Image: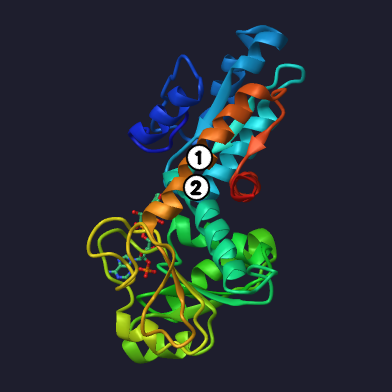
Amino acid sequence: MLDPNPRVSPFDVNMAVDAGFQHIIPYTNVGMDEVLGLTQDAIFSRGPTGVKATGLFIGGRDPWLALDMVAEARKSMVPPFEMAVFADPSGGFTTAAGLVAVVAEQMQEAGLKGGLDGTKVAIFGGTGPVGLVSAVLAADAGAEVVVVSHRSAEAAAKHTAVLKERYGIDTIPGDGSSESSRAKILKDVHAVMSTAKAGIQILSNKELCAAPELLVAADVNAVPPLGLEGVGVSDRGKILEGTVRGARGVGALAVGDVKYRTQNRLFQDMLAGDGTLDLEFRAAMKRAMELLG
Ligand SMILES: NC(=O)c1ccc[n+]([C@@H]2O[C@H](COP(=O)([O-])OP(=O)(O)OC[C@H]3O[C@@H](n4cnc5c(N)ncnc54)[C@H](OP(=O)(O)O)[C@@H]3O)[C@@H](O)[C@H]2O)c1
C-alpha cells in the first residue's frame, strides 16, 4: 500500500485482509518520484507468475494525485512483470461509486427509467474527493451536474475547471454560501447529493421541502448532525415527508453498504486478474452497478 500521507487507513488494511490478501505492507509519505522504484522492486522480486499474487493499493486524500500515481506505477512495469493497481484515496472512489449507483437506483424507483440520464444534480460539499468523483460519475451517467462550494461559486469553479481539463466534462460551479444562493440551485435539480465534511448539516428540511423538482436526496455523512435534515442514516428510498414530489431519501449507511461491497470486490478482482488491471473510480462504478443488479 502506497500512501502520500503519513498513515495508511486501517479501513483499507482491513478491507484488503478480508478480501484475501495475506500480507499488507504500508509505505507512507510516498512521493511521486518514489513510485517507479517501489513498483519495480515489488514486481521483479516475484517472477512473472508470482507477481500476479501481488497488488498495489494507492490511498491518500487527493484523487488526482492517486490517479497520477496509478499511471506512474503502470508505466514503471515491464511486461510480463505486471501487477494490479487499485486506487481509493480517502475511500472516495468507492464511496462516490456507491453514492451515484444508489441515487441512480432511486431515480429509477421514482419512475425515471434512465436513472440519472437527463437529470440535473447538485452536489453540496462537491469540492472534496468524494464530491468531485461523484460529479464525474454523475456526468458519465448523463446528468447535468452542479458542483457546490459553501464558500462561493468562484471556489467551486477552481474545481470544475480541473474536471474540464482532466475529463472534458462541463459541470456548473454553484454558490452554497447562503440560503438564497442555495435556493437558486435547488429550484430545478432532480437530485441532491451531500458529500460535505462529516458532522455538518448542509441543507435544512425546509430547504429540501422547497425544492420543486426534487426526486432524490442522498447524504454520505454518518456523523451527527447528518448532512440533509430529515434523511435518516439508513434510509434507502424512504419518502421525505413534505417534499413537493415525494423525494426519496438515501442515507450514509445505505451508501456505505454498497461502498463496502464494491471495495471488497475490487480487492478480489486484483487477486483474480492477470496483473494488467488498473482499478479506479470508473471500475468502482461498474462494480457498484453490478452489485445493485
Ligand atoms: N458513507 C460512506 O461510506 C462514506 C465513506 C467515506 C467518506 N464518507 C463521508 O463522505 C463525506 C465526504 O468526504 P470527503 O473526504 O470528500 O470530505 P471533505 O474533503 O472532508 O469535505 C468535503 C467538502 O466539504 C466542504 N465543507 C467543509 N466545511 C464545510 C462547512 N462548514 N459547511 C459546508 N461545507 C463544508 C468543503 O468544500 P467547500 O469548502 O468548497 O464548501 C470540502 O471540500 C464525509 O462526510 C465523509 O465522512 C462517507
Q: 5 or 1, which is in the foreground?
A: 1
Q: In the visual, does 233 lie left or right of 278?
A: left
Q: Give residue 288's mark.
A: none
Q: Residue at x 38, y 82 (%)?
A: 208
Q: Is residue 9 visible?
A: no
Residue 241 shows in this picture: yes
For disc 1, the neighbor class at 10 Å (few under 14, some 14 to 19, many from 20) is some
Picture quadrant where residue 117 is located: bottom right
Q: Disc 1 marks which amino acid? A: Arg
Residue that carries the numbered disc 2 in the rendered image: 258
Q: What amino acid type should be assigned to the residue bearing mark 2?
A: Val
- Which x, y percent locates residue 40? 61, 19
- Indicate which quadrant contains ligand 1: bottom left
Looking at the picture, how far across and down is residue 99, in whole percent?
50, 57
Mark pair 1, 2: CA separation: 5 Å
Q: Residue at x 58, y 68 (%)?
A: 109
Extreme right residue here? 79
Q: Do residues under tags 1 and 2 come within 8 Å of each other at their CB atoms?
A: yes
Where disc 1 sits, the SS reads: helix
Kindly identify which residue carries mark 1.
Answer: 261
Q: Position of residue 100 (x, y in %)?
A: 55, 60
Q: In the displayed structure, would residue 8 be above or below residue 208?
A: above
Question: In terms of secondary structure, where does tag 2 sit?
Answer: helix
Q: Residue at x 53, y 82 (%)?
A: 189
How many marks on residues?
Answer: 2
Q: Is residue 64 left or right of residue 111?
A: left
